[in-house]
Amino acid sequence: MSGKSDLRDLKLLIQSRNPIIGIESHEENRVLKLLSDLARDINKPLFTWDIVDGLKRFELLDEFDALAETSKPEDMLRHILGAHRPSIYVLCDFHPYVESAPHIVRLLKEFILNQPEHGHTLVLISHQLAIPEEIKRFISRFDMALPGKDQLTKMIKREAKMWSQRHGKKVRTDSKTLQRLINNLQGLTISDATRLVRNVITDDGAITEDEIPAINKAKFELLNMDGVLSFEYETSKFAEVGGLNNLKRWLRQREVVFHRRDELELDPPKGLMLVGVQGGGKSLAAKAVAGLWSVPLLRLDFGALYNKYHGETERNLREALKMAELMAPCVLWFDEIEKGISTQDNDGGTSQRVLGTLLTWMSENDLPVFVVSTANDISRLPPELIRKGRLDEIFFVDLPDQEARRDIFAIHLTKRKQSPENFDLEKLALACDGFTGAEIEQAIVSALYHCYGQGSALSTEIILDELSATRPLSVVMAEKLAELRRWASERTISAN
């Protein structure tokens, strides 16, 4: 269906006598095929130009020799201006000449001004188009439709069939993994999606759940999202988070609705806020949401977002949000959001404009992008950001209780190839009342360093010694923690 809608929309642009149409795409062959079908449909000659071959007539089944003396951009444009029969001219990779040559811009402007007489249409195809202000208002942008679920499903089945014919056996997968793969391939062109699927199948003739994170990372790299957004590859499985039982239960209830939002009548989940002390497990919980739902995790770096030039910060945010939409379904993590959005107005209004952009997107977004915001000091956040409707819920991540501390010890000992059965976990959990998960992890790390230096094996007693030498944040900042707990008791739901 996307091909038919592309043909219809592009046909409308040309028949409306738009002088120049700009198409940003890496799929040049796909665009040329579409334009060839269109030219035949409306009975107009189609010409293509590039710096190597010059200007030549292009037909679906044949290509004529290049026209003489048209390889140079200036000569080609002068030839088009002198041509009498209304035609479609496709200029491939023309962007360097538009950006750096004033006389080329002037020739394009003459083409635009004389379009009612000659009736030609120029189509500019490039991976990126930077249009000068002189002609910007006269150029119509056209975006090729990205493949939908049906198209992606057919492509995967086609690739699987081709592999099966070569190897004499079927590609192994299951319906749940296949559906996750289709969901996560959305936002890519059909050629990029095909390459990813082909690589996965060729590897071992199987599409498994373990391969989904690698596909998500490759998708992120294809979309060229480095900068203010980072891809968190190692999303922790939710089993690796000690405690937080209320939060786990809340997420499990919403997982199916998040993945099947088009099929179910329930309102899809939008996001949540995690508030708590530093080192209490908010960041790990944010990563674990993506791990539990088997979707990519994108982290927005507010430090990289801000720019000294007027308007650049808001543009950076808009681009980051658009990138998140392309990666959907995904989790978008605003880490320590209070550092990027302030209620103060001492930065020339930048924070207020960033807040406005973010609030508008949160209200209007209807794609499966689940927002997880983490904050250490929620008092610095504007009330309009944290009200119900923007986010679904605010969870308070308190210090872990004894049971959670025992689980945290088991998790971090296992991570470091230490068997939890060799330690008195109950004794350790009792000895670290008031410790955050990060402080427990650091005690284990310090104990391992001690053992390495002494040439001894890690034991319960050595870890207890490290715990006794530590002054946890709950002691150092006792007053601030008490105040945070008082605030949270009436305004949030306990994540534990």
Image: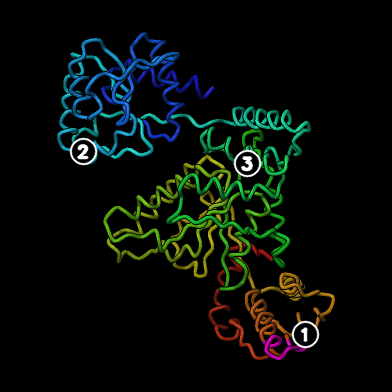
| Side of 350 relative to 410 (left or right) | left
Tag 3 or tag 1, which sits nearer the N-term?
3
Mark 2 or 1: in front is 1
| Image quadrant assignment for residue 183 | top right
Q: Residue at x 62, y 41 (%)?
A: 199
Is residue 455 within the magenta segment? yes
Measured Cα–Cα span from mark 2 to mark 3: 42 Å
Q: Quadrant of the C terminus?
A: bottom right
The crowding category of the residue bearing disc 2, from other C-alpha atoms within 10 Å (few below 14, some 14 to 19, many at least 20), is few
Asked if residue 109 lies left or right of residue 270, the reply is left
Q: Amino acid at mark 2?
A: Glu
Disc 2 or 3, which lies upstream in sequence? 2
Q: Please identify the quarter of the rendering in which residue 419 is found.
A: bottom right
Q: Which mark is residue 457?
A: 1
Residue under the image location 39 percent in, 50 percent down: 357
At label 1, counting other C-alpha atoms closer than 10 Å, the crowd grade (few under 14, some 14-19, many 20 or more) is few
